[in-house]
Image: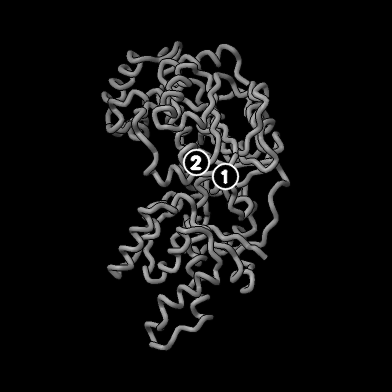
Amino acid sequence: MLDPENLEKIRQQFDGSPYPRTPLEKSPKSDYNLLFLHDITTPFYLRNQKVIDRRNKVILDVGCGSGYKMLALAEANPEAKIVGIDLSAQSIELAKKRLEFQGKGDRAEFFVMAIEDLPTLGMTFDYINCDDVLYLLDDLVSGLSSLKAVLNPQGLIRGNLHSSIQRVFFYRAQELFKMMGLMDENPGELEVGIVRDLMKSLKDNVQLKSQTWKTKHEHNEEWFFMNYLFQRDKGFTIPELFQALQGTDLEFVSMVNWRYWEPLDLFQDADDLPAFLAMSLPELGIEDKLRFVELLHCPSRLLDFWCAHPDRKQPFVPIEEWTDAQWKSAKVHLHPQLRREEVRTDLVRCIEEQRPFECSKYLNTQTRNTFFMESTLVSCLLPLWEGAQTVSHLAQRALKTRPIDPVNLEPTSENRAFEQVKELLSSLEPFLYVLLENSA
């Protein structure tokens, strides 16, 4: 997967500069977006439209580094066991200290090892987080195969690859600094200083500077190591990602930041497309849709994705096809990362002060715009902080909180209350603020 020379270069780089350099005392507890993406509830619901029971689940963090994302996994999945592996013994020691400092050490295990050695652990995993690792490997298919070999049948893998399109100027920079001999050995402070001086000395309109240089990172050595002086960094495209999944017999589930990969969001008016696109876009398969977006506007440095064993998806009826009977009996869950007292307190305050509630305030990685809703309507969701509820129960609550139609002053009918709750849930579910399970 990595020849010995390349493996040693990467080990040395991360022994010398463990990543990330986040202070041990920093906690991700208040980072709703980070926890939302590390909560296994999110990808399992996207694939199966079911809310997973996180008790006794085992999560693997591949390339755990100094342990901050491992800590996020532990924080986001409080009932799960977390296992971390990394090539760097120095990084593993920092990760251990971090998890112990944050009170999560009893739920964590650590191993210094390469991906291809995973089967020797004799363990299987319900979720594998492989963040900022795969693009370093000599053989992507072999790496994914090693992950698949230890993945439980219903399990999911999060992986990502650097985008060759979005990151093209950093690859040009790396070629330049290789030519200058700055990456012959493991780069250190001297090499960082040379790069910093060179970049600052360039005119602002020089392409490499205008496309890569950020003054705010001028004294951030970690940023230099992970961009300008990153050993073994490689870029990929959407077709190459799908080719690797096909070669490994893994099924694509979703992009991690899926809302930013929607083709229609790139147009000024999605309802007034050029005739050719209006006819052809709806017919595109998922790979072609993602490739279309990639070529127009690649949204991130990472092609960040979830994948799984093929043909293991649990069957379900899409929400847009539900009958009224299915809606009324459906279970509604609040996403676990919103089920916090501070969010409930904020909503209650909005209700008391009769002002709109900002639905996108706490989880906004999947939204392009801030959006608000009338707090008296959203108030019907308050029981979700106690646990899952049926849509019928929420509709009955809505009927009590809004007994009179504010427009015509007529009594609100049960059917009207049900339709209002249905519309509310339909607007929140695409962002996974609420999770809907069909119990029929």
User: Which residue lies under the disc numbered 2?
Assistant: 78
Observer-nearest residue: 102 or 42?
A: 102
- CB contact under 8 Å: marks 2 and 1: yes
Q: In the image, residue 204 lies at what x, y percent? A: 28, 32
Rendering coords of residue 272 (x, y %): 50, 66
Q: Nearer the viewer, residue 295 or 2?
A: 2
Q: Give the side of residue 438 with respect to residue 412, left or right.
A: right
Secondary structure of residue under mark 1:
loop
Q: Is residue 292 above or below residue 193?
A: below
The percent position of residue 300, horizontal first and vertical second, equals 46, 41
Disc 1 marks a residue whose amino acid type is Arg
Judging depth in this view, the residue of 169 and 400 nearest the camera is 400
Residue at 64%, 44% (x, y): give it.
Answer: 252
Identify the image quadrant of the C terminus: bottom right
**The N terminus sits in image quarter:** top right
The answer to which of marks 2 and 1 sits earlier in the sequence is 1
Mark 2: few/some/many CA within 10 Å (<14, 14-19, 20+): some
The percent coordinates of residue 47 (x first, y second) are 62, 50
Residue shown at the point (60%, 69%) measured from the top left: 327
Read off the residue under disc 1. Answer: 54
Q: Name the residue rendered at 33%, 13% in the picture.
A: 190
Above or below for 227 versus 382: above
Neighbour class for label 1 at 10 Å: few (<14), some, many (≥20)? some
Residue sitting at x 56%, y 41%: 305
Residue 351 position by quadrant: bottom left
Secondary structure found at label 2:
loop
Q: Amino acid at mark 2?
A: Pro
